[in-house]
């Protein structure tokens, strides 16, 4: 084999250099790592320790003077830049070497600069004449957080500018920008003069909706949920509210609502709505338990594009120990004015407190939600059969109308700690219109949540009902009253307080109940409760005999709301009873 002469010459040079030690280099692990300690005032030490590279990165002590000078120069620059973010613009930095690998950095940050003067200027439409613009400029200046005499910090300066820009751009001026921004530092006096100019640009007004992502659903579905009016002034909160409403629509998996920030489109800016459609059909299964109706299994079917019209079909079969239900409901998209219509049917059979009930019903509901108030008007036709144990079987037919009003003003819908819930109903039927009896039902419920201390809550609940009629004969059971059980008068069986007939409990024309409960949360997820419940249902005011229940319970915060396990003493029955249910009932 023949070796190239150039290779032989290179090999010879390498052997000579190796023999002379010219290329000898210590292995990376031969040098001890550089040990650096920091001496600095408490106010800046944490900042330097967190960000100074020489303290965070393990490295070998530089051997050459040039490398050492470069490292010291870089470290000094890092210290000065870090301290400048906290308003220290004239620091003194000293380096000392106790050993080749042991260094000490001494930092004197000097005097922290303070804000000497603040100038906020406006350009664009916001700088124009008129009381509204002047009032808004005054409001923006009043909300500016940095004042003369305060310490200067870069993070506070950046945050104040961003907040100012947001406050301008969130309403009317979608294309607002920072046109000029200066922080003039005078190291000699340790003072800073701040100047910001915000160019608002032109005022924006809402134009047409531009919807994308709709494939299987009717294209006009988004417009049914929109409350934006062409020509109204731009308001970011209005767009976010519209987006939140669309995100709750079952036909949509995700929604983004925004506008292009182009000043050329300000007179009628289009609203871009980007939709990702949800899965149309869903089959579900569930199981559960409550002391009111026992163990439960359920199968449900949901189609959010029923008949390709964006109708929402919810149907299912629920089998409980004491009640069985087959139901189907169809919800239509919102109509003009924010009203939403639905219609459905139900077949139900139950055996509760010695009363066997079977019924079927179908009807329609028109509901409306505005803010925290929800109203509903329901029209329903139903037929039911009641067979009380030890009593006489009866059949009832009724066409009923019922109007309900609910206000929920609480801090958390699933786990309220502060606020209140009010609910009222009025409804009935007439012999002249497919009912066996003339009757009018009135019902009201109020719940007050009062926070106590940092975690605890006091809950006060009251409900009152009356059905005005000559007698309870011919009135459907759901237009009469029974009480008792979880979320009612604890210490007594579910719906066991009412009118006794044979061995069964039937509904009465009058009902009243009050409850006081205190919940102490000793951990984030766990709490204990004590409560007092009083109430009864009867067929006349003379027969009304309030029953007392007292007890204690455990609470666990689940994703569906607090789960309650209560042990209650029924004073009239002289017995302990366990109740298990979700602790929030709206």
Image: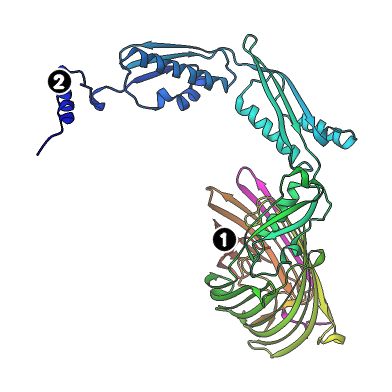
- Residue 165 lies in the magenta stretch: no
Comparing 396 with 209, the one in front is 209
Relative to the observer, which residue lies in front, 8 or 323?
8
Q: Residue at x 67, y 34 (%)?
A: 162
* In front: label 1 or label 2: 2
- Disc 2 marks which residue? 16
Residue 467 visible within the image: no
Q: Position of residue 201 (x, y in %)?
A: 78, 38
In terms of image quadrants, where is residue 333? bottom right
The residue range painted magenta reads 449-477
Q: Which residue is mark 1?
A: 564
Disc 2 element: helix
> Marks 1 and 2, Cα distance to the nearest angstrom?
87 Å
Q: Which quarter of the figure is the N terminus placed in?
A: top left
Q: Quarter of the image for the C terminus: give it.
A: bottom right
**Residue 282 against residue 125 in the figure, above or below:** below
Say whether disc 1 or disc 2 marks the residue closer to the N-terminus.
2
């Amino acid at each position: 084999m023949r070796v190239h002469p150039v290779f032989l010459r290179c090999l010879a040079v390498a052997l000579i250099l190796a023999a002379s030690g010219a290329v000898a280099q210590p292995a990376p692990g031969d040098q001890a790592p550089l040990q650096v300690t920091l001496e600095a005032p408490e106010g800046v030490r944490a900042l330097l320790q967190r960000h100074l590279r020489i303290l965070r990165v393990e490295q070998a002590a530089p051997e050459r003077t040039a490398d050492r000078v470069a490292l010291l120069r870089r470290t000094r620059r890092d210290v000065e830049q870090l301290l400048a973010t906290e308003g220290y613009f004239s620091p003194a930095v000293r380096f000392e070497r106790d050993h080749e690998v042991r260094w000490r950095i001494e930092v004197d940050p000097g005097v922290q600069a303070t804000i000497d003067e603040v100038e906020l200027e406006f350009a664009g439409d916001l700088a124009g004449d008129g009381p509204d613009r002047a009032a808004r400029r005054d409001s923006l200046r009043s909300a500016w957080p940095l004042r003369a005499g305060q310490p200067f910090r870069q993070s506070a300066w950046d945050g104040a500018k961003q907040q100012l820009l947001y406050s301008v751009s969130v309403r009317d001026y979608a294309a607002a920008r920072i046109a000029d921004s200066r922080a003039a530092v005078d190291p000699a006096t340790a003072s800073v003069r701040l100047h910001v100019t915000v160019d608002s640009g032109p005022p924006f007004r809402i134009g047409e909706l531009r919807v994308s992502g709709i494939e299987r659903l009717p294209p006009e579905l988004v417009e049914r949920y929109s409350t934006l009016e062409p020509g109204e002034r731009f308001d970011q909160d209005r767009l976010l509210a519209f987006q939140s409403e669309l995100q709750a629509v079952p036909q949509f998996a995700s929604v983004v609502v925004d506008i292009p920030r182009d000043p050329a489109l300000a007179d009628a800016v289009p609203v871009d709505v980007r939709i990702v459609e949800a899965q149309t059909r869903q089959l579900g299964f569930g199981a559960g338990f409550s002391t009111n109706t026992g163990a439960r299994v359920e199968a449900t079917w949901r189609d959010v594009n029923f008949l390709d019209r964006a109708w929402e079909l919810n149907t299912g079969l629920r089998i409980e120990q004491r009640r069985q239900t087959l139901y189907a409901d169809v919800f239509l998209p919102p109509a003009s004015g924010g009203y939403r219509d639905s219609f459905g049917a139900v077949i139900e059979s139950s055996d509760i407190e010695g009363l066997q009930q079977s019924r079927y019903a179908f009807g329609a509901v028109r509901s409306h939600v505005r803010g925290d108030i929800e109203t509903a008007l329901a029209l329903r036709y139903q037929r039911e059969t009641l067979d009380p144990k030890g009593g006489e079987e009866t059949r009832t037919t009724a066409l009923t109308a019922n109007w309900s009003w609910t206000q929920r003003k609480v801090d958390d819908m699933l786990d309220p700690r502060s606020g209140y819930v009010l609910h009222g109903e009025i409804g009935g039927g007439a012999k002249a219109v497919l009912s066996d009896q003339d009757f009018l039902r009135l019902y009201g419920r109020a719940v007050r949540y009062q926070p106590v201390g940092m975690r605890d809550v006091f809950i006060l609940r009251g409900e009152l009902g009356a059905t005005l009629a000559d007698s309870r004969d011919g009135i459907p059971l759901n237009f009469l009253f029974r009480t008792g059980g979880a979320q009612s008068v604890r210490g007594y069986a579910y719906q066991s307080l009412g009118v006794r007939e044979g061995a069964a409990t039937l509904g009465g024309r009058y009902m009243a109940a009050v409850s006081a409960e205190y919940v102490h949360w000793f951990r984030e997820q766990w709490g204990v409760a004590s409560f007092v419940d009083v109430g009864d249902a009867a067929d006349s005011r003379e027969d009304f005999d309030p029953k007392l229940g007292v007890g204690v319970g455990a609470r666990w915060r689940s994703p569906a709301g607090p789960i309650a396990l209560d042990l209650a003493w029924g004073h009239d029955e002289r017995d302990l009873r366990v109740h298990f249910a979700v602790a929030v009932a709206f």
